[in-house]
Image (cartoon, rainbow, N blue to C red):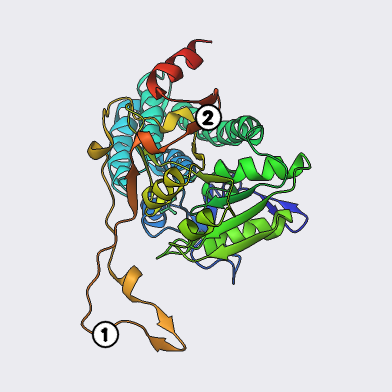
Amino acid sequence: MKKGNETMRTITWNDEKQVIEMIDQRIMPQEFKINQYGTYQGVADAIQRMVIRGAPAIGAAAAYGMALAAFNSQASSTEALLEDLRVAGKRLNQARPTAVNLPWAIKRMMHAAQGFNGSADGLRDHLLRLAKDVADEDVEMNKRISEYGAALIEDGDHIVHHCNTGALATVDWGTALGVIRMAHEQGKRVHVFVDETRPRLQGARLTAWELDQYGIPYDIITDGSSGYLMRRGMVQKVLFGADRVATNGDVANKIGSYMLALAAYDNGIPAYSTFPISTVDFELERGELIPIEERDQEEVLDITFMGQQVTPERASARNFAFDVTPNRLISGWITEKGVIYPPFMQNLQAAMKA
Ligand code: MRU
């Protein structure tokens, strides 16, 4: 990520202190702070509280969390270490339910641990190397995705973007926002309508901050504005990410994505979901089977306007963090294997073989 003249990642391993460092995304953009985590329980907690968020970033956090668990374990045999890793994997897996990247990363780490032949210390080093690979691959993958996606963007496009899918949502660079950034770096003039993305305001806080860093023009819009802008001919593309994709092509993403895709469909505007193929859950046939996180109602109710609490004291709220967009509303998937058009699964398989 670009912060002024510096380049940094949302999550890194500090070799000297053997701790994980993460940018605290809860307090951005007003404060920019790096937190250190020395236990896997701390990492799980950070994922749950959204210090780190965005599907690919929490996958990397889980991978580093498993490596951290290995380094903190007192086990002297690989069997005992494996047992400690199972416990850590279970806790990390419970942090947030929707993004498939979390179980995907834990499974990858466990699989590598189970197949390892050597000492417990050897396994610790092996897992740390793998966690670093998971992080590096994410950055590389995002750039490949962005190259494919940028080819769809035309000079002068106005793009509605939902939530935050940039460098902050990944290890670095980003997916849907990475596409926009790539198009901008290629010299295309793009303008972004940034959905503010209630209740945690990832758009207004994080996407707007990133666009400032990259020098990409934008306007923040309130959630629900995009339909009106589309009807006025002010939008050429809709881009969002994905937290989990079912094999029929349904996409779970930040709450509001469905309504956005619906408005785009009604106005004949292409809506693309952008993600690495590891976001496809090959075990789930339909979007309705995707577990949807419901978060604390305080996130919705704790809002002030003109210095006053907005909601009545006894108000209650429901806070679904994600929704599912049916495949028929999605024009294409932008992936590291290219842009996949419907029928999604058939064309994905062909692209994977190519
Ligand atoms: O609740 P969050 O902020 O973790 O939700 C993030 C999103 O919904 C993103 O759009 C998705 O993870 C893709 S990020 C590349």
Q: What residue type is labelled 1?
A: Pro
Q: Which of 184 and 22 is in front in this view?
A: 184
Callout 2 crowding tier (Cα within 10 Å): few <14, some 14–19, many ≥20: many
Q: Which of 265 and 62 is in front in this view?
A: 265
Q: Which of 351 and 22 is in front in this view?
A: 351
Circle 1: element type:
loop
Q: Where is residue 214 in the image (x, y as percent from the top left)?
A: 72, 53
Q: Position of residue 126 (x, y in %)?
A: 49, 27
- N-terminal label among 1 and 2: 1
Q: Is 162 placed left or right of 97 in the picture? A: right
Q: Position of residue 77 (x, y in %)?
A: 34, 28
User: Residue under circle 1?
Assistant: 312
- In the rendered image, the vertical position of residue 210 relative to residue 147, given as above or below: below
Q: Position of residue 146 (x, y in %)?
A: 62, 35
Find the distance from the CA under tag 1 to the CA under tag 2: 45 Å
Q: Return the mark for residue 324.
A: none
Q: Residue at x 31, y 81 (%)?
A: 311
User: Residue under circle 2?
Assistant: 335
Q: What residue type is labelled 2?
A: Thr
Q: Which residue is drawn at 25% across and 64% down?
A: 318
Q: Is 130 placed left or right of 259 in the picture? A: right
Q: In which quarter of the image is residue 200?
A: bottom left
Of all residues, the one furthest to the bottom in this rendering is 307
Q: Is 106 placed left or right of 306 in the picture? A: left
Q: Is 181 placed left or right of 233 in the picture? A: right
Q: Which residue is drawn at 62% across and 31% down?
A: 140
Q: How many labels does the image show?
A: 2
- In the rendered image, the vertical position of residue 262 relative to residue 28, given as above or below: above
Callout 1 crowding tier (Cα within 10 Å): few <14, some 14–19, many ≥20: few
Of all residues, the one furthest to the top in this rendering is 353
- The answer to whether one can see residue 116 in this image is yes
